[in-house]
Image: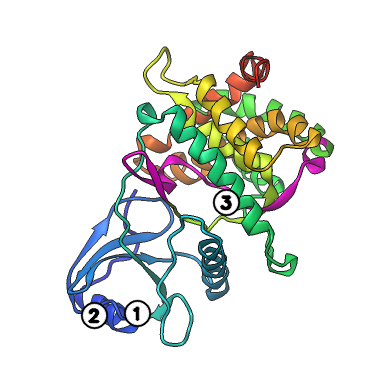
Amino acid sequence: MGTFTQLDDEDARAIAHALDLGAPARLTPIAAGTINSNFALDTDRGRWFVRVNEGKSAEDCGWEAALVVDLAADGLPVAVPRAAPDGRRFFAHRGLLVSAFAWQAGRHRAPSEVSLGDATAIGETLARLHVAASARRRSTWRDGIYQYADIVARFEGFRGSTDPALAHAIEVLGDEFAWLTGQAGVRAAAGHGVIHHDLFRDNVLWDDGRLVAILDFEQAARGSFVYDLAVAVNDWCWDPGRGTGRELRADVARAMIDAYDRAHPLSPADRAALPVELRASAARFTVTRITDVHLRQVDNPDKDFRAFLARVEHWRGAGLGELFSVV
């Protein structure tokens, strides 16, 4: 994790002036995330979270901002970027697209801290998010950059690697993608709309037991509702302290799925697709952690592809039966 773009005091003054943040006092880089460059900006009007949107177009930034504005209007706990004088919720500055958000108090849950109550809150909030985001005009929906074909193409890009660290992953993923391709009809039959695509623990803030903010909608796009639910299960519902450190907490997963179902009832087609999506989402994050972290030699133990490869293997084994026998 790191800061890819450096900002100095002159940049801070320009951003603060353009977005009406107050007189800047201190700009501090935040070493978090693998895509954007993030900063804490202290001014005489408080603290702000400043994000340099790396690799995005103005259209991307505008789409994401419009989505969170609508979600906030529907009562979802999301962070809304400040509006610039021209009405856009980002500022174009020396070739950079910069967003700023009011600083939100709270912290992320560690894996060992996730409770049944947390899982219930995540399931319910994700369901509300799906309903609100998908109520927007269909003409505003977009396709994301992590479609199934994109993930398979990434896999094919390293499938011939001779890196011994990847040998087992390549073998497992090859079998998995062959199986997933055969499940295309099951996946297509499930409910689709606008989904978050990345509801990991580091994209949610908590204030004690209260969920206060869902963050980072840059991957939000058209997709399967149960795929999004599966992404959340695959991150939130694993115990780092037992056995291999990668064991499913089935009670937490069931609490999340049940809460989602109460708020946004799962159809028979959704229920049929959910086991498939648990495998698909685990494979997706195995692949992207290989391409974005391992192959780029990024030193980030929290993004080790082996953790998600373990989930792929869990679902290929007895894991689905363990979960769905009582769901």
Residue 283 at what x, y percent from top left?
61, 34
Q: Residue at x 70, y 32 (%)?
A: 274
Where residue 109 sits, quadrant-wise, is top left
Tell me which segment is drawn in magenta.
186-212
Pointer 3 local density, CA inside 10 Å: few below 14, some 14–19, many at least 20: many
Amino acid type, callout 3: His
What is the C-alpha distance between the residues marked 3 and 2?
Answer: 33 Å
Question: Helix or strand or loop: what does disc 3 sit on?
Answer: loop
Where 10 sits versus 241, above or below? Answer: below
The answer to whether mark 3 and mark 2 are in CB contact below 8 A is no
State the residue in front, 140 or 304.
140
Question: Helix or strand or loop: what does disc 2 sit on?
Answer: helix
Can residue 144 be seen at all in this image of the molecule? no
Amino acid type, callout 1: Leu
Pointer 1 local density, CA inside 10 Å: few below 14, some 14–19, many at least 20: many
Amino acid type, callout 2: Arg
Residue 19 bears which disc, if any? Answer: 1
The number of callouts visible is: 3
Which of discs 1 and 2 lies nearer the camera? The answer is 1
Q: Residue at x 43, y 40 (%)?
A: 201
Sequence-first tag of 3 and 2 = 2
Label 3 sits on residue: 196
Q: Is residue 248 magenta?
A: no
Residue 13 bears which disc, if any? Answer: 2
